[in-house]
Image (cartoon, grey):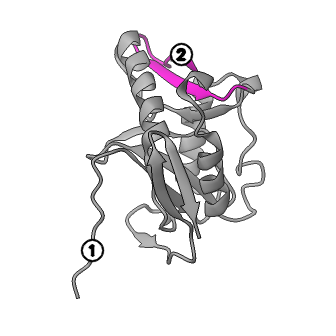
Amino acid sequence: MAETVDVTTTASIVFSSFTSAADPMPRAWSRFRDQLTSTDQRPVDGLADPQSGSVCVWRLLASNNRELARSAVLYRSFDDARAAVFAARLPRQDFEIRSVHGPNAGTHGWFAQEPDGSPLMTCGRWYGAHAASVDAAQHSIEAFCLATVLAEGPRRLSPDRRRSVREPATARAHVEPLSEGIVRLKA
């Protein structure tokens, strides 16, 4: 039996879950985010109680699977992460881009925040030039607003990252594009 693979020419938002917030990957994710945001801007996320179960994140991927951005928050479940993505798909002018200097000389990054001031997404890497960082941020926000949100469940990543297990998709909503940046959810 052949497996079908969906191919998209637009950006997509994919979800990953980790067995525990104490896993090294969510910790590294959070440390990177914390270098981008000041203490008063850091979102409250699933790391508050690292022993309380799995966490889920989303990533914005280009059509070639290159990471454009990642969620600034670690969510408690796939449903929470997915709902946050749909709630945040605002008109592009409602996002505020914050440019930051990296930990080393000549490194730059960015994060985008919602109108209420809470960080929504961050860059996934450091850039060598300020202009490249700002350009990447603007492109990422545009891609986020137009991205296909995958309806399948998250990929559960094991602590050693050598294995990943695709979680079975339960009854999820189908995404129907209506126009640029607007989608309809169908049960």
Q: Amino acid at mark 2?
A: Val
**Image mark count:** 2
Q: Amino acid at mark 1?
A: Thr
Q: Nearer the viewer, residue 111 or 31?
A: 111
- Residue 148: percent from the left, percent from the top? 43, 51
Disc number for residue 4: 1
Q: Nearer the viewer, residue 23 or 8?
A: 8
- Main SS, magenta region, reads strand
Check disc 1: other Cα within 10 Å, few if <14, some if 14-19, many if 20+.
few
Seen at 75% across and 63% down, the residue is 52
Check disc 2: other Cα within 10 Å, few if <14, some if 14-19, many if 20+.
some
Q: Is residue 28 in view from this perspective? A: yes
Q: Nearer the viewer, residue 141 or 33?
A: 141
Q: Which residues are magenta?
A: 96-115
The answer to whether 62 is drawn above or below residue 7 in the figure is above
Residue, disc 2: 100
